[in-house]
Image (spheres, grey):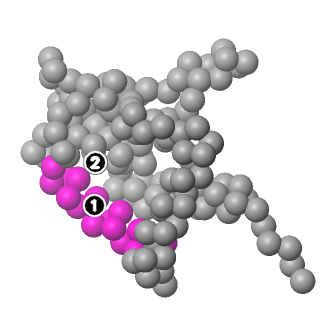
Amino acid sequence: MTEQRPLGFWLKLLDRMIDERFASTLEEHGVTRRQWQLLSVLSTGGATVEQLDVAIAPFLAAPNPRADIEPESSVEHLSELIESGWVDATPAGYEVTERGSVAYRRLADVVAANREIATEGLTTGEYSAMIDTMERIARNLGWADN
């Protein structure tokens, strides 16, 4: 009989697989997963770098004091979106352009298809219970939604 694998195994495996699928799918459309996340946040309204960093914090590389590595910032992922004409830098922060809104809606369909594949066979209740459980574990380990 095979021993049940621990939570950490499944979380790491799923994280890697989700990253790989998103990277592959979004790359076909010329964006990275971080750029998609920024577009997603900005599609609801303008934001400063600080607000964007907080919104996508779990996806940005954390600082590593032992390796003298600074934390990653949204700025590093915004430049290509600005060059593409999808995002504008304004005195108040960043906002999605009309061209960016069109691209966002197109990409939203691609992302929704990925999510459907990942959750195939799960009922709405099972999915909701899984998300609730993972949030509870994160809070037990000290995460606080800012």
Residue at the image point whose x is 15% and y is 17% from the top: 91
In terms of sequence position, does the residue under pointer 1 or pointer 2 come before the other?
2
Residue 106 on the magenta span: yes
Q: Main secondary structure of the magenta part?
A: helix
Q: Position of residue 13 (x, y in %)?
A: 66, 60
Q: Look at the image and tell me in which quarter the N terminus lies.
A: bottom right
Residue at the image point whose x is 18% and y is 45% from the top: 44
> Local crowd at mark 2 within 10 Å, few (<14), some, or many (≥20)?
some
Residue range highlighted in magenta:
101-120
Q: CA distance from mark 1 to mark 2?
A: 8 Å
> Local crowd at mark 1 within 10 Å, few (<14), some, or many (≥20)?
some
Note whether 66 is above or below 141 in the view shown.
above
1 and 2 marks in contact (CB < 8 Å)? yes
For this view, does 48 lie left or right of residue 11? left
Residue closer to the observer: 127 or 133:
133
* Residue 136 tag number: none
Name the residue beneath numbered marker 1. Answer: 108
What kind of residue is marked 1? Answer: Ala
Q: Look at the image and tell me in which quarter the C terminus lies.
A: top left
Secondary structure of the residue carrying tag 2 is helix
Corner quadrant of residue 11? bottom right
Residue closer to the observer: 143 or 78:
143
Q: Position of residue 52 (x, y in %)?
A: 33, 32
Query: What count of labels does the image hold?
Result: 2
Name the residue beneath numbered marker 2. Answer: 40
* Residue farthest to the left, as pictured: 98
Note whether 82 is above or below 3 in the view shown.
above
* Residue farthest to the right, as pictured: 1
